[in-house]
Each structure stands twice: as C-alpha cells, then as structure tokens.
Image: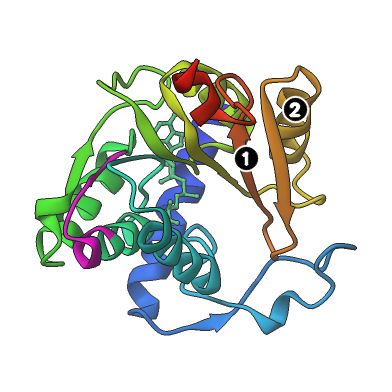
Amino acid sequence: MGLFRKKMKAAHKAMLQAERAGGALMPEYHRATPECPHPERWSMYDSMTAEVEVLEFLRTLVTTVKPGLIVETGAFLGVSTQWFAQGLKINGRGRIISCEYDPVIFEKCKENIASSGLSDWIELRQESSLEMKIEGAIDLFFSDSDVPIRGEEVRRFLPQISPYGLILMHDASSHLKHVREAALQLEDEGLISVVMLPTPRGLVIAQKLDGRERHPSKRSAA
Ligand SMILES: C[S@@+](CC[C@H](N)C(=O)[O-])C[C@H]1O[C@@H](n2cnc3c(N)ncnc32)[C@H](O)[C@@H]1O
C-alpha cells in the first residue's frame, strides 16, 4: 500500500475511534520524551486531535492576541477549529479558515461545525494546505496537517504572516522529529524565532523575523 493511502487509512481509523469514544477524555497516548517525561498528566479526545490542554491554550491565545485572521492546516474533525472559533466568539471579531483535504473526514468535519453553533466564525475548505490560497495578512497560523509537510506549509504562508503574528506548529516533540527539525531549520535560516513548549506532542510557537523592529514607533517618527 502506498504511503498516501496508508496515511488516509490511519486518519479514517482515528476518526472512527473518536466517534466511538463520543467525546470522552483519555490520558494522552504519546510516549514520554526527555522534554515531557509524564505525558499521562495530559488528556486527549483521540490521537489526531490536539491535546486538551493545548486546545485550551489555543483558545486563550486567541482571546489574548485577538487575531483578525487565523489559518489552520489539517482540520480533522474540527475540534481545534472550534476551540479557535470559541476564542473568536468571545472576542466578537475575526475568523478562521481551515482546510482538510480528505473528502470523508471533510464531510464529518463539516457536519460537526454545522452543529457547533460556531459556523459564523469558520470557513472550512476541502483542499490541500499546499494549494490553499488566502487573501490578506494572517495573524495566527496553526500548522497541523501531515507531519512531513509542516515546514513547507510555513514557508508557503510566511510572506503573508504578519510580523506581529504567531506561527504555531503542532507535533514538534523530539520523538516525532520532522516538525522540530523543520522549525529549527527555519530558525537557522533566520526566518523565524522559535520557542518549543514541552507538551506531549510538542508545540512550536514562533514569530517571523522579517519586519521585526526594536522601536517601530521611532521609525514612524523619523
Ligand atoms: C493531526 S490531524 C488535525 C487535528 C486537528 N487540527 C485538531 O487538533 O483537532 C491532521 C489532519 O490533516 C489532514 N491533512 C493531511 N495533510 C493535509 C494537507 N496537505 N492539507 C489539508 N489537510 C491535510 C489529515 O487528513 C488529518 O485529518
């Protein structure tokens, strides 16, 4: 079986598991890592949806920085999309555009969002993150699609990300490697500055360096 079909199958299996669990919380499944030796202290709905504590953090980030536009790659069942949207609803402004390329998962996600009461804040697209076109400046970018392409996604959207915006890359644990290395590579190239949160699956918070000024007010005064 090709790698692509194998990944699709794994995602469908995770979707069925999530449906069977019916929203019940479980201890986090990810193995211990040097940076997060007790993953069982965290909770999860399923192995694809971000850890519950990370979801809470995402909503709080939204209420903290009040983004106008959030872009998410990899909606899966729309759980993180809805947590972002809850933050937008509390703020009373902004929107989230999220994409999911798998047609079966997309349909389920669409249903979930339709019944969430948060549809006004969400634009869900059935397309690949590597083809998705976004208009305008992105204030918060959440990369959570296929692990090996996360670096490519950030590179693709970087010119549109606001210098005051935030870039989040999920699954950056030392065990998963790909995302961590992609983030550090982008940092080595002087494109972004990275902080790695030691959560079970790992979360990178980054900001782009281009456009960062020490004293922006002095520039406008000059
Ligand atoms: C880890 S799950 C996303 C979990 C979700 N963000 C959450 O926390 O609730 C990854 C999802 O990305 C989708 N995906 C993978 N590659 C993609 C791509 N290039 N474009 C859009 N979706 C993609 C997969 O089908 C899967 O549903």
Give the SS element for disc 1. strand
Residue depicted at x 35% and y 79%: 23
> Can residue 1 be spotted in the picture?
no
Give the SS element for disc 2. helix
> Can residue 42 be spotted in the picture?
yes
Marks 1 and 2 close (CB-CB < 8 Å):
yes
Viewer-side residue, 147 vs 90: 90
Viewer-side residue, 153 vs 10: 153
Residue 37, percent across and down?
84, 72
Q: Amino acid at mark 1?
A: Ala
Residue 146, percent across and down?
53, 36
Q: Label 2 belongs to which residue?
A: 187
Cα distance in 3D space between marks 1 and 2: 9 Å
Disc assigned to residue 206: 1
Q: Amino acid at mark 2?
A: Glu
The image's colouring method is: rainbow
Residue 121, percent across and down?
16, 52
Residue depicted at x 33% and y 33%: 101
Instruction: Give above or below for 128 relative to 177.
Output: above
Q: Which residues are magenta?
A: 88-98
Locate residue 179: give its quadrant. Answer: top right
Q: Quadrant of the N terminus?
A: top right
> Would you say 160 lies left or right of 42 here?
left
10 Å neighbourhood of mark 2: few (<14), some, or many (≥20)?
some
Q: How many marks?
A: 2
Residue depicted at x 75% and y 40%: 180
